[in-house]
Image: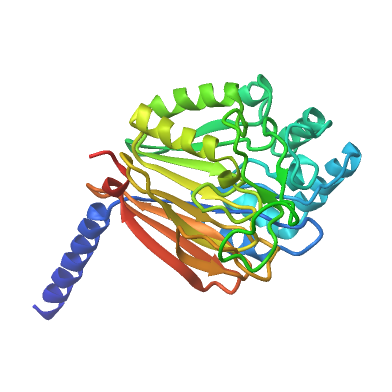
Amino acid sequence: MKQLTTSLAIALLALAACRSAVQEPPVTSIAFGSCGHQDEAQPVLSLAASYKPDAFVFLGDNIYGDTDVMDTLRAKYARWMAGADFKALAAATRIFATWDDHDFGRNDAGKEYPFKDSSKAIFLQAFQVPDSSDRRKHAGIYDVVYLQQGDKRIQLILLDVRTFRNRLLYFDAKKDTMPAGFFYTPDYKVHSSPDSTLLGEAQWGWLKEVLQAPADLRLICSGSQFGITYNGYEAWANFPHEQQRMLQLIKETRANGVLFLTGDVHYAEVSKLEAPGLYPIYDVTASGITSTWSFATPNANRIEGPVMHNHFGLLRIRWEDDPQISMQIIDVRNNQRIEYSIKRSDICFK
């Protein structure tokens, strides 16, 4: 009798465990990061691999190319990808990427960079982009990828903020007014001209079509920060007409579930941009695979951070009736430094 009771108890526990497993909502996890020097160890990538994310997105400055010699650029990619940390990540998950200035080829460069076509070819080869990809059929490297979780669909929108961008306007300390609250002299000032360009007309037209496609969550991946206020360095805020055009496009297309993943600045933070007639736009910045910075710039939209140590970002989507989206920053010592959660309904039109 005692043996029968024990067997029954074990069976009931097993049944309860099975029911719990069935009822547990599925989770999609997407890791991301930027700013890693190819000649340095990158334990952040091995750490990210240990989380076994469904994807990892490189947001730019994936190497520090900074050269007009294409053989040098190619060799830097090869050294990076031959490293144990990159190999661990590549073995653990799918990798997607866009670029920023240093892997584009020149610091803070835009469309004036004369080797952008050659640099593009090297980028596509390094990341093993198929010959059939649309990225090989148009100027620049912008692309959209779809991740599926059952009947749920995530767009990874990989923007190109380099190939078509106008030159930045230098800040002149002798002529220009120092912004209030700044404790440093800005490098750049705001483009006041409404025809200043960041994405270019072809990319804008493509993006409009992408935002009209069905998706449960849309992750817009940009090498430059989108949701911050002007800080005197590179950002969408240097091109306010383009920043407003993005917000207007989201409103025009009624695209629900937009969230930005960005890099560039050598620290991590979460920004929240609010605009009339639009749900809040969150921007999760993960920038510091190997790079660090001595201070965080002013950002009136910052709601979490900054994190000044090496790190990667992790987005976890729990597919409940109203999906929960957790924005996390994990530092190189495996400490969770930021965790900020929202519901999908928080980033939808009402």
User: Measured along the vertical axis of the image, is residue 296 above or below residue 118?
Assistant: below
Relative placement, left or right, of 98 versus 299 is right
Residue closest to the eye, 273 or 213: 273
Where residue 249 sits in the image (x, y, percent)? 43, 30
Residue 219 visible from this viewpoint: yes
User: Which image quarter is the N terminus in?
Assistant: bottom left
Residue at x 25%, y 50% (from the top left corner): 320
Judged left or right of residue 217, residue 91 is right
- Percent position of residue 87, x then y: 69, 53
Which residue lies at the image location 88% right of the left edge and 39% below the top edge?
A: 68
How are the residues colored?
A: rainbow
> Residue 317: horizontal and vertical position, in percent?
37, 51
In this view, the residue farthest toward the bottom is 2
Q: Residue at x 59, y 21 (%)?
A: 202
The reply, left or right, for residue 145 in relation to residue 45 is left
Q: Residue furthest left?
A: 1
Q: Quadrant of residue 21?
A: bottom left
Q: Quadrant where the C terminus lies?
A: top left
Q: Can you tell which quarter of the image residue 35 is in?
A: bottom right
Q: Reply above or below: 119 against 224.
A: above
Q: Nearer the viewer, residue 298 or 35?
A: 298
> Residue 86 at x, y = what percent?
69, 54
Residue 212 position (above or below residue 279): above
In the image, residue 346 sits, relative to residue 153, either above or below, namely below
Count of number-bearing discs: 0
Asked if one can make out residue 50 in the rendered structure from this viewpoint, the answer is: no
**For this view, does 42 lie left or right of residue 308?**
right
Give 203 or 15, whichever is nearer the viewer: 203
